[in-house]
Amino acid sequence: MRSRYVIGNWKMHTLPSEAEVLAREIVEHASVPPASEGGIGVVLCPPFTSLNSVIHTLNGSAISVGAQDCHHLAQGAYTGDVSAQALLELGCSYVILGHSERRRYHLETDIQIGQKIAGATEAGLCPIVCVGETAEQRNADLTFRVVESQVTAITHAAGVDAMNGCIVAYEPIWAIGTGVSATANQAQEVHAFVRSHLLSLGVIDISILYGGSVTSSNASELFASADIDGALVGGASLLASSFVSIVEALAKT
Ligand code: PGA
């Protein structure tokens, strides 16, 4: 089943005390329509160190919490890593996996990302799985080939069962944090391609979000596209008013 989401990726921003203030501002101002009224999922993904304060601040609200990574195993001698089981017990429901910043700075591969998806779904978390091409790849007309190979490798490593029910985020790397979003047409054609490719692999239950310089100014146009089920928002999720405007834009679509 396709669902619609606005998800805030706070990256390595906010101290625990600041995260609590931002989460409170968002929960006080965002009106999240319930599922019965074409509802949308709203998720905040703060740094690990702010998860606890954000979970407590949002307790009892319609807004959920996600982490930005997890290990693929439930426990073990992995200093500095965090398991999906621990995140679930803390109160997380989602986890971002395979963000391009993890691929770039931590050399994560599609196979590792697939293993993390399997581990996260086994634990009961919903993965938000990121794919997307670099500027060089787009300029060389390789966008579809790159995204196809990421989706195929991730699905093979995770297994079709684990992929069903996940959220995929198409995040062109050239659009992340640059202020230059993909156009609605550019995003739509990749989303339609990813959806049909996943279908051909047996993944029928998927929501596909766009990420990369989404703001309150361009959100409505992106959300009007047939295959865009919402947004993964970085910079604009750090200001309550802009994040709330993006939530409202999706609710109105
Ligand atoms: P951005 O980041 O909205 O700041 O471009 C999106 C992301 O990296 O998830």
Image (cartoon, rainbow, N blue to C red):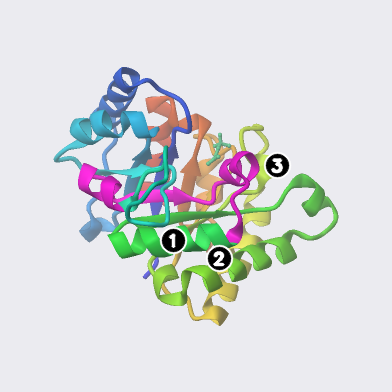
**Given contact means CB atoms under 8 Å apart, are the residues at marks 2 and 1 in contact?**
yes
Question: Could you tell me residue 97's position as x and y percent?
Answer: 48, 51
Q: Nearer the viewer, residue 21 or 67?
A: 67
Ligand 1 quadrant in view: top right
Q: Residues within 10 Å of mark 3 (few under 14, many from 20)?
A: many
Q: Which residue sits furthest front? A: 77
Residue at the image point whose x is 45% and y is 58% from the top: 116
Q: What stretch is highlighted in magenta?
A: 85-110
Left or right for 140, reference 147: right
The verdict on residue 68 being magenta is no
How far is mark 3 from mark 1, CA to CA?
A: 25 Å
Disc 1 designates what residue?
117
Residue 154 - label? 2
Q: Mark 3 or mark 2, which is nearer the start of the sequence?
A: 2
Question: Could you tell me residue 150's position as x and y percent?
Answer: 63, 63
**Given contact means CB atoms under 8 Å apart, are the residues at marks 2 and 3 in contact?**
no
Residue type, mark 2 in image:
Ile
Mark 3 or 1, which is nearer the eye? 1
Disc 3 designates what residue?
174
Q: Mark 1 or mark 3, which is nearer the start of the sequence?
A: 1
Q: Is residue 211 visible?
A: yes
Question: Could you tell me residue 3's position as x and y percent?
Answer: 37, 61
Q: Can residue 167 be seen in this view?
A: no
